[in-house]
Amino acid sequence: MTKMSHFVLVHGIGGGRWCWYKVKCQLENSGYKVTCIDLKGAGIDQSDAKNIHTFDEYNKPLIDFMSSLPDDEKVIVVGHSAGGLSLTDATHKFGKKISLAIYLGATMLKTGVCNEQDIKDGVPNLSEFGDAYDYGYGYGPDKPPTSALLKKELHRDLIYQLSPPEDATLGGMLLRQGPHKALVSARFNEGPDVDEVPRVYIKMTQDLVLKLEQQEAMVDRWPPTEVYVLESDHSPYFSAPSQLVDLLVKAASSVAV
């Protein structure tokens, strides 16, 4: 039955469906159906991230996709990094359509970014690297920034330190600013099925962005059904694609779809 599983892959801030190209290829070659989502202002979506000010607007492509699924169809949704917020939102709203939620080194906060503890556990803190971001100002240059992207000179050392150089180059060409304000203002009204959806957390041991201790803190606060471990940098779809696929298949085999 897992051969017919349908994976829905959701990127993190600044990424796009392009980042899953290796994983999508391997899963499809193994007989799985795979859908990769471009969130608002990401990938080939032409929206400017600095003008996306609410999480609902940013996550609308995933919510629209989930809405379009027949009521009797279930999917496995994988959220990477900040894509964990998108996954949690979908789980609150469409729990009956999700057979498994997989958090891939992702922000896993049950009700969103609501307090200082949520920020400490689920939001990357790169202050040790000084002025690490380039910002966009949707409300004007005298107002707080609304979008952000890690500076290019830090990509290789922080996002892709274990990834092949050609993939690091690809990422540097395609990464875009993401709607930082929209993400840190994400709030979820708890859906009736959210705790009934099985969850798997994949910890990424060499992640320098969402650090391992943050991942473990979120796992402790909202324990998932299973926890797997992957030796990977922040971009496992580049640095460990085959190992990642093995874990996704293992997780899929644990649920009836």
Image: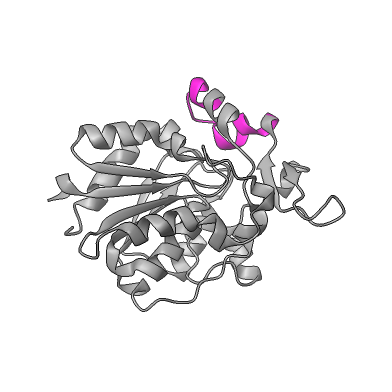
Position of residue 53 measured from the top left corner of the image (x, y, whole percent)? 66, 59
For residue 233, side relative to residue 198 (left or right) = right
Which colour assignment does the render follow? one colour
Furthest residue toward left = 1
Position of residue 98 measured from the top left corner of the image (x, y, whole percent)? 30, 62
For residue 120, side relative to residue 128 (left or right) = left
Q: Between residues 237 and 55, which one lies in front from this camera angle?
A: 55
Q: Main secondary structure of the magenta part?
A: helix
Quarter holding the C terminus is bottom left
Position of residue 109 measured from the top left corner of the image (x, y, whole percent)? 50, 66
Residue at image x 24%, y 43%?
33
Q: Between residues 68 and 131, which one lies in front from this camera angle?
A: 68
Q: Is residue 119 visible?
A: yes
Span shown in magenta: 153-168
Residue 144, located in which quarter of the rendered image? bottom right
- Compared to residue 210, the image places residue 119 above or below, namely below
Furthest residue toward bottom = 192
Q: Is residue 63 in the magenta section?
A: no
Q: Is residue 200 visible?
A: no
Residue at image x 29%, y 42%?
34
- Compared to residue 147, the image places residue 89 above or below, namely below
Position of residue 242 measured from the top left corner of the image (x, y, whole percent)? 32, 33
